[in-house]
Every structure is written in structure tokens, then in C-alpha cells.
Image (cartoon, rainbow, N blue to C red):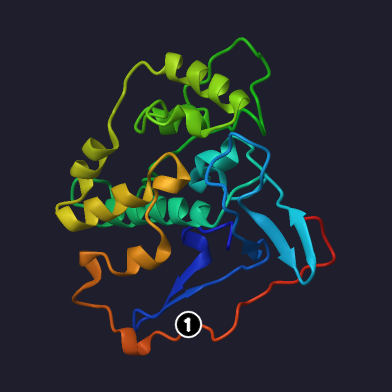
Amino acid sequence: MHRDLKPSNILIDDQCRIKICDFGLARTVIESNKSDFTTNALVGIRSTGDKHDVLSPRMQSRWFRAPEILLVQPNYSNQIDIWSLGCISFEICAFRSDTINPFKRNTLFRGTSSEVFSPCSDENEEDPTEQMLVIINSISSSENIKYWSKDAQKYLQKKEEQVSNFYPLEDKLDDVIENEEFKDLIMCMLKFTPNERIPAKQLLIHPIFDEIRNEKNESPPDTKVIIDETTDNY
């Protein structure tokens, strides 16, 4: 689990070879049978050899931060990286689109604050650019509200009441993407609840990659990779 995927951490050369960099926040996680946040059971648990520690909630850069991170859920999984990839994919398409200014960075969810991490000075003041509100202005959180912890449900219900100009994600994608398969791919990655997001293995077999994927060049590790960071509390 990388935990900080963003455009500046994805490198590409003149041969269109792509490398992911900056693994300083990356961690190995083990999976639990639990699939929601309604209990205290952990879905994402840091694995360092024989140690299993709770993952830190303060991860990812704000514009690419998944809802479960914004909701400070400690039991997140590698689906937070899938969310970030969806945001990055939109930004790439917006940069290439003739309908968008190519000299302006067009981030999908361009919030200016995260209420939990950097709240407004006035607690009673509604911030229309707060990151979670920016997200639910395009992706409703109400369809699977019981997935979340009770505190998170209360917070989301409050945020849903603040939505004044709902602009569906599908419409945003229509503004910059013509390829229906690519729009479907991004929609699959940007599901509000992580258990509804497309897993990485299914992402690779999405029809958008049929013409370019070469499985012979793929070399998954023979053994499980363990990132053993014993010098910090992440």
C-alpha cells in the first residue's frame, strides 16, 4: 500500500515507461474478514514481521485523499490507492482535453482544507471548499451510509445537508473524456465506499487495457513483500 499516490510520485520517460516513486509512507497490510467500519475490527493492519500495528490515519495528499482517510477510519486498506489513481486519471484526461485550459492544473477534488486535520477557525462557518464537501458535491455518501462507523455517519449526514449544487461525477467526466470505457474505469475507481471500488487485479483486466496489456511482461513477486519499518509509528 503506497498511501501517497499523486502525479508528482509517478514518473514517465520518453519511452512512456512509468515508475512509481517515494515509498516513504508505503506499508504492508494484512487483510481481515471484516469489510466495513461499523466495528472496531481492523481491515488494514500494519504488518512488520511478527508485529501487527494499527495504521496511522493521517495519510495521502489532500486532493487525492480517500473518504475513509478523511473520516479518520483506522482500518483502511489498499483501496485508498485505487481512489488516488482515479483522481490522477481524471487529471491526466483534463490536461489532454481541448475543453480545459492545458496550462491550468485541473484537479478533480480541489479542496482547500480537511475539516478533521485543518478545521476552519470558526467552527460555525461552513467551508464550501472543505475536502469532504467537495467530494460529496459529486459523489453521494448516502447510498451505503451504514458501512461507516456511527460517528462517521453523523458527520456525513451533516455534510450531505450542506450540499447546495450537486454536480454528478458522471457529468464531470463527460466534460473531459470521450472514451466510454475510460469513463467507466474512473467511475469504478471512485466509489465512495472502499469495498465497492474495483480491486487492482480486476482493474488490470478492464476492457480499456485489452489492446495494450501484455501479461508476459508482468512479473508478480513469488513471495509476499514485507515493508519492515521499525523506526516510526506509521
141, above or below 227, in the image: above
Q: Seen from this angle, which residue lies furthest front?
A: 33
Residue found at x 76% / y 60%:
52
Q: Residue 23 occupies which quadrant of the picture?
A: bottom right
Q: Position of residue 12 (x, y in %)?
A: 42, 75
Q: Seen from this angle, which residue lies furthest bottom?
A: 216
Q: Is residue 148 left or right of residue 172?
A: right
Q: Nearer the viewer, residue 179 or 49?
A: 49
Residue found at x 58% / y 63%:
2
Task: For label 1, count other residues whose C-alpha is less than 10 Å away and answer few (under 14), some (14-19) or many (20+).
Answer: few
Q: Nearer the viewer, residue 88 or 155?
A: 155
Q: Position of residue 31 (x, y in %)?
A: 59, 59
Which structural element holds mark 1?
A: loop
Tally the marks.
1
> Is residue 214 in view from this perspective?
yes
Residue found at x 63% / y 46%:
75
Q: Is residue 185 left or right of residue 61?
A: left
Q: Position of residue 25 (x, y in %)?
A: 67, 61
The kind of residue tagged 1 is Pro
Q: Seen from this angle, which residue lies furthest right?
A: 231
Q: State the quadrant of the N terminus.
A: bottom right
Q: Which residue is mark 1?
A: 220
Q: Position of residue 99 (x, y in %)?
A: 19, 45
Q: Nearer the viewer, residue 12 or 86?
A: 86
Q: Seen from this angle, which residue lies furthest top?
A: 124
Residue found at x 46% / y 53%:
84
Q: Nearer the viewer, residue 20 or 197?
A: 197
Q: Residue 162 occupies which quadrant of the picture?
A: top left
